[in-house]
Amino acid sequence: MFNALVVEKDEESGKTSAEVKQIGEEDLPHADVTVAVEYSTVNYKDGLCIGPGGGLVRKYPHVPGIDFAGTVESSDDDRYKPGDKVVLTGWRVGEAHWGGYSQKARVKADWLVPLPEGLDTRQAMAVGTAGFTAMLAVMALEDQGLKTGPVLVTGAAGGVGSVATAILANLGHEVAAVTGRPEQEEYLKALGASRIVPREELTEVTKKPLEQETWGGCIDAVAGAMLGRVLKQMEYGSSVAAIGLAGGAAIEGALITPFILRGVNLLGIDSVMQPYENRVRAWERIAKDLPMDKLEAMVQPATLSDLPGLGKDILKGQVKGRVVVDVN
Ligand code: NDP
């Protein structure tokens, strides 16, 4: 028997509750690789799945945790053998399939990536889906070519934003960090931000077709009114990598003008269904371009029993940086 965070749903009231419980191997879903999980983490989606589900969870009881890192215990697939260190993000694990908030997980070999050289399992989960997505966004901006102005990172004190800030600064870019939490200024500057932009400066919806060209690139975790404004402030030919919707699913106040008058690109970033080759490329870049002391400065340690509270916090935008959950 081993520990897992199990979410159950009361069919009458429709309410869910999450609790650490003992489960057995026979409870795990059928798949080809069993992993002894060492660490997991907390992303926005985890907040939804620990709580009422947000339409992501298919059936109950459910074990959330959209990413994990650990050691292969047994494998029916030639690509993995016992003792291999592995990392998993995405593929709807922790949503449609049981996830990483458990001392053991059973998943498809196709969903795993070998732990990249230079990272241990704890560091891999300090990165997690959030950091992996930040790297995908940096790679997308690089593929398009970054312009001369500072790179804007929105939702900067959150998980994706913190890692994006640290990577971009380490690559030598000037980073402007947008935050609604002025008390996080020192934290963001320590990660490498050279400028803090208060959230309120970018949340007013305006009718202006364009504003002054200011940003040479942007990684946006917020969308809503902020993305509508930011698009109008992008330099000619620059790109915005859109990764999230912390401020709303619509792009409020957006006009076509930045696209047709300034050739601005809006690049969509999805971490969940990302093909294997690009996953390996992103993890290798993380090991190379994310300074480990900066990563450590983002980490807040936690255990399985902290998760119900942390799930609520992340939905309120109150988690700073990256939570690393030691499941053992
Ligand atoms: P976090 O909660 O850690 O960070 C989000 C940050 O956004 C907050 O810390 C806050 O930053 C800011 N924020 C929150 N609410 C608002 C608001 N109403 N208006 C403006 N800013 C706000 O989440 P993650 O970094 O893990 O994820 C960010 C987003 O990216 C989420 O929407 C998530 O679902 C999405 N995501 C998408 C992925 C993909 O594959 N495309 C993968 C991973 C995440 P601050 O306090 O600094 O202002």
Image (spheres, grey):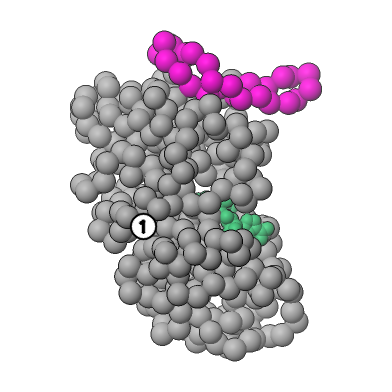
**Image quadrant occupied by the N terminus:** top left
Q: Nearer the viewer, residue 31 or 150?
A: 150
Q: Position of residue 233 (x, y in %)?
A: 58, 82
Between 180 and 60, the one lying in front of the other is 180
Disc 1 target residue: 294
Query: Which residue: 79% across, 22% down?
Result: 13
Residue 74 falls left or right of residue 186: left
**Which quarter of the frame holds ligand 1?**
bottom right
Q: Can residue 12 be found in the magenta stretch? A: yes
Figure quadrant of the C terminus: top left
Rendered residue at 41%/63% (across/down): 191
Instruction: Please tell me whether mark 1 sits on a helix, a strand or a loop.
Output: helix
**Residue 196, percent from left and from top:** 54, 72
- Residue at (59%, 76%) from the top-left corner? 231
- Residue 4, percent from left and from top: 48, 21
Residue 33 is covered by the magenta coloring: no
Viewer can see residue 269:
no
Instruction: Relative to 282, say whether 92 is above or below.
Output: above
Q: In the figure, residue 286 lies in which quadrant?
A: bottom left
First to last magenta residue range: 1-25
